[in-house]
Amino acid sequence: MAGDARAVSRDLSIGVFDSGIGGLTVLRALMQRLPRERFLYLGDTARLPYGTKTAATVERYALQAVEELTGRGVKALVVACNTACAAALPALQAAHPAIPVIGVIEPGAAAAVAATATGRIAVLATEGTVRGGAYQREILKRMPEARVMAIPATLFVALAEEGWTDGEVAVATARRYLAPLFAAVAEVPDVLVLGCTHFPPLIAAIRQIVGEGVAIVDSAHTTATALEQLLDARQLGRQEGSGAADFLVTDGEERFGRVGPVFLGRDIAPATIERVDL
Amino acid sequence: MAGDARAVSRDLSIGVFDSGIGGLTVLRALMQRLPRERFLYLGDTARLPYGTKTAATVERYALQAVEELTGRGVKALVVACNTACAAALPALQAAHPAIPVIGVIEPGAAAAVAATATGRIAVLATEGTVRGGAYQREILKRMPEARVMAIPATLFVALAEEGWTDGEVAVATARRYLAPLFAAVAEVPDVLVLGCTHFPPLIAAIRQIVGEGVAIVDSAHTTATALEQLLDARQLGRQEGSGAADFLVTDGEERFGRVGPVFLGRDIAPATIERVDL
């Protein structure tokens, strides 16, 4: 926890932690919203996916990963992985009291509540996130009369990783997960929260099943807004500079550089990717 | 490596190592073939899947896992995970010279060569196994004129783990991976090797795409034959007893007990599952 001892200054990077590669959809939104900031992204690619692991194991892995980021000096931390937020956010905040630590679940829940007219909200997430119930709690805290339906959709993670984000398999998978809920004649949700960072690339296939009348909430953008407000409030935003991102991965630098651009929406230079052992 | 120091005796268990849960298809074949033997299965469920990790990381994880098994005393070791065989079999054999260590790739390659008439052999495996080229080498060593086509099929792992082994998604996935090769009018392979332990539950969907004329080789059964021959040759087979299996997992005992029977073909009693940290 060396980083916690340093003075938190505007000039430091913003740490972004994810189980692997999906969190790059969050980094993409952060870089769009905060173009002057520098980001240090850590993807725990050796131990992904987190979505099918127990909460205790995810918490242990998250603490190790964040220690690596704080040791290098960061002024704020975004936990981009929904599963890690659900399992480890309180532990991460307790371990690093000097640094603001924000997750993606609270901003996603707030956006869902803002978007619903009927109070019927569906959450699509990994097995671990659904089991932990964090989205359900955060939505009900803001809207006690809401009806939240959480759907574990593990296979979407593999589809996004394989780059099969459209076509027959993606649509058939979306149908199997979503049609039971959205093909009903009554009580259909009017909001669908993408509660995993791997899901935004699959949005076209998802839209084909849920139809146009459903608002799809992607917590990446609301998290970017939350981070901007936080930096403003603490006077931690960079006043100038052109922004940049560096990447730490625990395995597979080559694969990260090859698959990452699908999620980040821009190329990743090999020289910006460093392998670390946790 | 405490186990290596003990005398290797008939009464010890046979260790079976896998990245997670798929190796239970191999254990199933071993238990059918060798009903008097006791087995100690270790699934590295905290760190699965191995199929998308680099060879160096898989080797490191495999050495840790096998040390846990040998420390408990085993008379032989089966590496059930194709990816671990491809990345780590020589290192495992070197680290444990007192114990016979066999993998699934050599028996699978031998069975493929025995089954082909045309010499055109397709291998369906994980990204890591395909990249390592072990199947290709083992087949060509036995049949230099063979034409081997290796297809990375990562998504099948997730499908099997999700229990979606038949239906629209499984068939569409099989079509996307296999139709380019098997829908050709000429030079179609006459043998398809299932080079990952997760794939046997998907055999019906695969058969629907490749047709009846293709021999599908599942290395689980040929590995069981190889182990039987090895135990006979070294006079290490148990002469009596009713057989049993115990299970070590690195995470998610509950999930292992719930999903495991899909692969093992029989129930797994919770009392037989122990959590270990590697």
Image: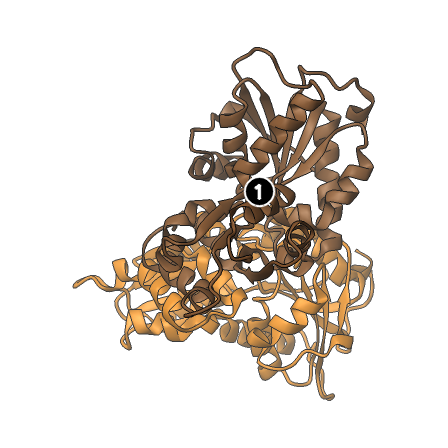
Chain colours: A orange, B brown
* Residue B154, above or below B32: below
Snapshot quadrant of residue B96: top right
A233 horizontally vs B198: left or right: right
- Tell me the residue at 73%/66% (across/down): A248
Q: Residue at x 38, y 59 (%)?
A: B209
Q: Amino acid at mark 1?
A: Gly
| x and y percentages locating residue A175 in the rendered image | 31, 63
Q: Residue furthest top?
A: B240
Point out the image quarter for the N terminus of chain A.
bottom right
Question: Chain letter of disc 1?
Answer: B
x then y, percent, for residue A71: 80, 61
Q: Quadrant of residue A122?
A: bottom left
Q: How many numbered marks appear?
A: 1
Q: Nearer the viewer, residue A191 or B218?
A: B218
A67 on left or right of A90: right
Residue A198: percent from left, percent from top: 51, 66
Q: Nearer the viewer, residue A122 or B115?
A: B115
Q: Is residue B210 visible?
A: yes
Whether residue B232 is situated above or below residue B21 in the rendered picture = above
Packing grade of label 1 (10 A; few <14, some 14-19, many >=20) is many
Image point 50% across, 60% down: which residue? A158
Q: Which residue is mark 1?
A: B20
Residue B197 percent across, percent down from the top left: 53, 45
Q: Is residue B95 left or right of residue B43?
A: right
Q: Is residue A48 left or right of residue A51?
A: right
Q: Secondary structure at mark 1?
A: loop
Is residue A93 visible to us here? no
Identify the residue at image location x=53%, y=53%: A86
Vertical placement of residue A20 versus B257, above or below: below
